[in-house]
Image (cartoon, rainbow, N blue to C red):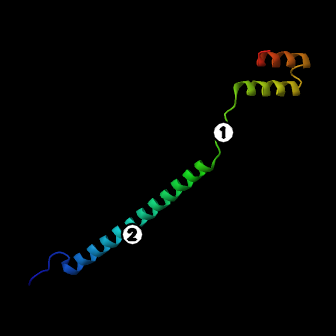
Amino acid sequence: MMRRRGVGIVGVAAVAHHASKRGAQQQAAADQNAAQQQELEAAQQQAAAAAPAAPAVDPMTAQLENLASLHTQGVLTDEEYAAAKAKALGL
């Protein structure tokens, strides 16, 4: 009596089909992830382009605003505020 060895041609075909199907599923998932990544990057680029650039603040203006804030809070008296303002303006 002869014994069959191995899985035979039907078994090999079934394994090959399963491997092919699995590979296609993995490729589809990878393609979907790549598309989502591209959409995310495009949205980030649009958001960065739409965001207005912060205006450049002149150091003197910032110092005067700080002095005015301190004066409004009562930290500086009228005389101290006037003297500090004159010094900042170079008067």
What's the amino acid at mark 1?
Ala
Q: In this view, does 60 lie above or below 48?
A: above
28 or 43: nearer the viewer:
43
Q: Residue at x 41, y 62 (%)?
A: 30
Comparing labels 1 and 2, the label whose residue is closer to the camera: 1
Identity of the residue furthest to the bottom in this view:
1
Total tally of numbered discs in the picture: 2
Q: Quadrant of residue 63?
A: top right
Element marked by disc 2: helix
Identity of the residue furthest to the right in this view:
78
53 or 26: nearer the viewer:
53
What's the amino acid at mark 2?
Gln
Q: Name the residue under label 1.
A: 54
Q: Which residue is drawn at 36% across and 70% down?
A: 24
Question: Left or right: where does residue 49 sit relative to residue 74?
Answer: left
Q: In which quarter of the image is the N terminus?
A: bottom left
21 or 79: nearer the viewer:
79
Crowding around mark 2 (Cα neighbors within 10 Å: few <14, some 14 to 19, many 20+) is: few
- Label placed on residue 25: 2
Identity of the residue furthest to the front in this view:
91
Position in image of residue 72 (x %, y %): 88, 28
Position in image of residue 39 (x %, y %): 52, 59
| Disc nearer the start of the sequence (1/2) | 2
Q: Distance between the residues labelled 1 and 2?
A: 47 Å
Position in image of residue 60 (x %, y %): 73, 24
Q: Residue at x 62, y 50 (%)?
A: 50
Q: In this view, does 9 lie above or below 88?
A: below
